[in-house]
Amino acid sequence: MKKKIEEIRKLAKDSIAKVKDLQGLEAIRVKFLGKKGELTSVLRGMGALTKEERPIIGELVNKVRDELEEHIQKLESDFKQKQLEEKLEKEKIDVTLPSTKLKRGSKHPINRIVEEIEDLFVSMGYDVVDGPELETDEYCFERLNLPKGHPARDMQDSFYVNTEYLLRTQTSAVQARAMMANEEKTPIRIICHGKTYRRDDDATHSHQFGQVEGLVIDKNISLADLKGTLEVFVKKMLGQNSRLRFRPSYFPFTEPSYEVDVSCFKCDGKGCNLCKQTGWIEILGSGIVHPNVLKMNGYDPDKYSGFAFGTGLDRLAMFKYGITDIRLLYANDVRFLNQFDRKDEENEIKY
């Protein structure tokens, strides 16, 4: 029995010395130390030994097992270290080589306009609010003094989903929601911006376009407050030399209502092809909140008054950056977007 164990020991050590990789080493472990291995078979045959021989043979088998396991573990560690070194060598890169330049993106002109507007009005104490793009007829029209059958609904060619829901034609719906959500009917000073939808599609109109609207409701609000606010707004967006002109107009949710023109920033009001030789460019709509709108949304028109205004984000972007076709804002043309890497203050972006 001792001779057999010594033969197993010598054969295992010779095999370990010749092994070339981890797979071969694992095969040797199974052959000599596994459940059906050579040393295990010796232990199974100890039943035929005398009481005096069993502890001697058992101790010898354990000694050989420990010796072989030590050799196998050491060689296994060496193989793993070698594999790691080979992997590192294979994956090694030369950090002194010039790096691959990545194309740098830039903010979309609409995002630039939105951030600039938000910064301005938040600094003036306004809250920025939001609302759903899939709107109900009630909030999109009825609560803005446009009941069913009102002829002014024809001014906005709408996308209806069914008789109750439509894609909002204006962000004014958010104003109605803000008034209704204000249960204590305290003063409101908000702006809201987002996507709106109408059946238009040409060089200056799109079926989807961005709007920003402002609403102020408080005691003793007058046209002077509206004019002062819009002067700050327009001069911030289009330049300190901008001048405003108010023209009477009609909007169902304001009374009186005004179209607001700004002096042409290309010719400074002298007349050019951009302003069609008039010296003025229409930029937004505004007015004093209609008493019916206040009443329908829970405000006492004898106690509160307010003003509202709205303009297109796309229109502002086109004026500010000299963009001639609104469809460029949605075309994802990298040649167009790359022009906006420069700072807004340069105000030299042309297409």
Image (cartoon, grey):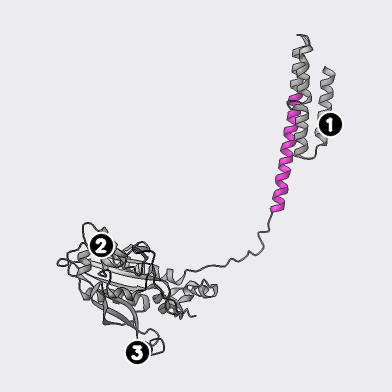
Q: Relative to residue 155, is residue 12 drawn left or right? A: right
First-in-chain label (2 vs 1): 1
Residue at image mark 3: 278
Residue in front for this viewpoint, 251 or 223: 251
Give residue 163's quadrant in the image.
bottom left
What amino acid is found at the position of numbered circle 3 in the picture? Thr
Residue at 75%, 17% in the rendered image: 58
At mark 2, the secondary structure is helix
Q: Quadrant of residue 122?
A: bottom left
Quick check: is 50 in the magenta stretch?
no
The answer to which of 282 and 28 lies nearer the viewer is 282
- Residue 82: in magenta span: yes
Residue depicted at 33% across the width and 66% down the height? 192
- Crowdedness of circle 1 by 10 Å Cα count: few (<14), some, many (20+)? few
Residue that numbered label 2 is attached to: 179
Q: What is the magenta range?
A: 64-93
Tag 3, which secondary structure? loop
The residue located at (79%, 24%) in the rendering is 38
